Amino acid sequence: MRREKENLKYIFVVGGVMSGVGKGVTSSSIGKILQSRGYEVTAIKIDPYVNVDAGTMNPTEHGEVFVLNDGTECDQDMGNYERFLNRELPGANYMTTGSVYLSVITKERNLDYGGKNVEVVPHVPLEVIANINRSAKKAKANIVIVEIGGTVGEYQNILFLEAVRILRVKKPEDILLALVSYLPQRSEDNEQKTKPTQYAVRTLNSAGLQPDIVIARAERPVDKKRKDKIAFNCNIQPEDVISAPDVKNIYEIPINFEKDKIADRIFEKLGLNGKKRDLKEWKKFNSAARNFKKTVKIGIVGKYFGTGNFILSDSYISVIEAVKHAAYALKRKPEIVWLDAHNYNKETDADYRRNLKQLKNYDGIIVPGGFGSRDIEGKVAAINFCRREKIPYLGLCYGMQLMVVEFARNVARLKKANTTEVSEKNPYPVIDILPEQKKLLAEKKYGASMRLGVYPALIKKNTIAREAYKKANIAERHRHRYEVNPKYIKRLEKNGLIFSGISPDRRLMEIAELPRDKHPFFVGSQFHPEFTSRPLAPNPLFLEFVRAAIIKK
């Protein structure tokens, strides 16, 4: 990586027209391209929420809560940054309106402002700038990419745009502003409409900012005429309009951007000398992924899919990407299907038996993480079916806990076994909160009762987990409050369940499984292996699961 004595360069990415337009993958893709040119890049996400972090946000409103190594609960875009850049990012690279205000207020209470009047402007924008600079310095970065959540024109964005304006006044030669804006198209016969993008740029102008580059998002590639029109009306050059058509695989985006020579435009505007392109492995990965003919069909049984009449797959985005990484590594095209746990609950669906039988149509089933009691019995029924019918099964966090509940009820003869998250007074609490955590909950210290971030685990020999990881010591990321109850471990093991991964102090069960001679793949992890999966380095547990699914197929 380059270690030139150049000023730190800042690339700010903002959105126009609508949310969900792809600012996160745009930021990640720009980062990947600049990284491939020899620069040390770090990425930061700013969320406009008053929440201090993403931990209390509902997945159906906000999408997946991603967890970093240090335990920071953050926006899913942080996961995209890590996957594209192949970097482990610290919590300092994520900030919200709430966290910035909290920092400013704490400083004021500690007299750090020396008795000055503390005002929203300039002190909040200055705090944002200070956070960005600290993160870039810690990463020893040449370039810091900062994604500002939401869309221009929203009240929540104003203070962050003000931070960009202040920084641009101080360091005009070191700042680049990219606007990601959507070009709607009513049908294939109609032209892509540039007017919404023009309005987005004018709204940005009203905040004292002019974009240097416009990323033109659309269903299809943006033609020259539309580029010329955007350039003329938005005070930029046609070559500064980068076409960003829809793609089937988000990892193709950096390659598409390079077709429009985005790196050359960035280098010219920031006064950088880019080295020769080196996206060889990335291109090889994408080329292979496009050409796989054989498929593997994976069903994800969850409860965070519904948002009105629509499906919100973002609730499980890291799981989806981890399945893709593993499938591509095994030369398969993944078919991922959302399965609502509600359909397998005999209390809520009269056709639950028929629905369960349809699980045979899948090569593998995943029950991902979650919280609460809704549709839990549907998940347990699906897990039971997978165990009995020998369908490859991977349980993640809550998916492992419910796997233990199902095994306790139907194999260990603890008929009413449950998790105390669902039933506090059940006779066999095989999943429970540990005594020290109960004390914290009694004191209403809810955040402190969560196990967050990376923890080590020991993997037993002659197990599926050891076969997958190929080593005895691993470290994976957690986000949960409940654990396998130590009181029932011997009873469960006696009946055939193997706890193949345990904490170094042997108190916490990290991986549960059935042996190969009983089931081809019936494995659950208390941690979230999806958080550490990368396009060119799939997580071992997902890789072994997809391999078992392929063999089943």
Image (spheres, helix red, strand yellow):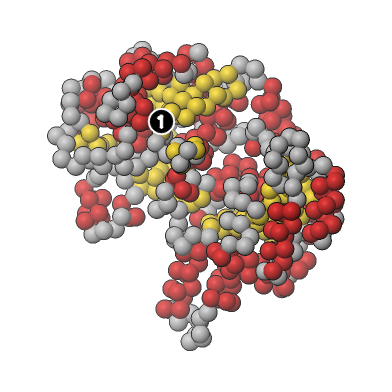
Of 505 and 113, the residue lying toward us: 113
Q: Can residue 396 be seen in this view?
A: no
In the rendered view, would you say 86 is above or below 346? below
Of 134 and 309, the residue lying toward us: 309
Query: Residue placed at 17% from the left, 25% from the top?
Result: 415
How many numbered tags mark residues here?
Answer: 1
Query: Residue placed at 43% from the left, 24% from the top?
Result: 365
Q: Residue 199, located in which quarter of the rendered image?
A: bottom right
Query: Residue placed at 45% from the left, 53% from the top?
Result: 54
Crowdedness near tag 1: few (<14), some (14–19) or many (≥20) residues, C-alpha within 10 Å: some
Residue 472 left/right relative to 167: left
In the rendered view, would you say 330 is above or below 168? above
Of 91 and 499, the residue lying toward us: 91
Q: Can residue 75 be seen in this view?
A: yes
Residue 398 left/right relative to 256: left
**Image x and y of residue 121, in percent:** 57, 76
Q: According to the image, label 1 marks what residue?
A: 340
Query: Residue placed at 46% from the left, 62% from the top?
Result: 50
Under circle 1, the secondary element is: strand
Looking at the image, which residue sits at the far bottom?
115
Looking at the rendered structure, the kind of residue marked 1 is Asp
**Image x and y of residue 46, in percent:** 56, 58
**Image x and y of residue 305, in percent:** 45, 37
